[in-house]
Amino acid sequence: MKATSFLAAALLTCLALPAAAETRVHLGPSWSGQSELSAAPAVFVQFPGKSTNTFLDKIEFQHFANLGVIEGRSREGDQQDVWLAGAGVRATRPGHGPRYWFLESQVFMNAGETTSLSGHFQFGNGIGYAHGPWEVMVKHISNARIRPPNHGETMVLVGYNF
């Protein structure tokens, strides 16, 4: 990741940690749907809401805000990083213990544009597993063919809850 993007993401994380009751930080490689492009680092900081809602005593929903950056890469040498800000919801089993599966869905606005993330409106979906404060997740972000090209980004992220 470019030094400026990494420093900006680290600064945002450090500023947000004391302000939020709970903060999740996820990082890992992201692959473009355009297979000839190499993997790039991705970092996301998630700020979960304090309240949860339960549906039919079967599913628990928790809303969250999310900030992220994916390092830019392309065949043409355009190295523009993509910054994402959005909100979403995490679905889990009610009353889960320290180990649980979860699904996430979110909507992003992005600054920057690449061949993988074109347009400024993106959708993200992921599935993951939490074990205590640690999480592992597979996430896909794309614009749902609102604006071509629509290659998207798929990432494997490891996270920690502060």
Image (cartoon, grey):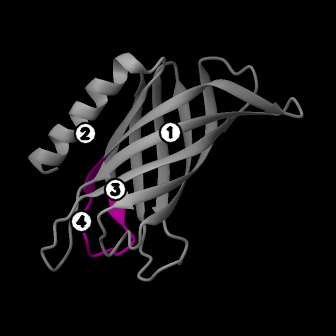
Q: Amino acid at mark 4?
A: Ser
Which is in the foreground here, disc 3 or disc 2? 2
Residue 101: image location, x then y, percent:
63, 35
Tell whether position 40 is magenta: yes
Q: Which residue is mark 4?
A: 38
Badge 4 marks a residue whose secondary structure is loop
Hey, which quadrant is residue 48 in on the image?
Answer: top right
- Circles 1 and 2, Cβ within 8 Å, touching? The answer is no
Report the disc number at residue 30.
3
Residue 67: image location, x then y, percent:
39, 43
Q: Amino acid at mark 2?
A: Ala
Q: Is residue 7 above or below residue 82?
A: above
| First of labels 1, 3 by sequence position | 3
Magenta part of the chain: 30-42
Q: Is residue 1 above or below residue 65?
A: below
Which is in the foreground here, disc 1 or disc 4? 1
Residue 58: image location, x then y, percent:
84, 33
Q: Which residue is mark 1?
A: 65
> CA–CA distance between discs 4 and 2?
21 Å
> CA–CA distance between discs 3 and 2?
16 Å
Q: Which residue is mark 2?
A: 9
| First of labels 3, 2 by sequence position | 2
| First of labels 1, 4 by sequence position | 4
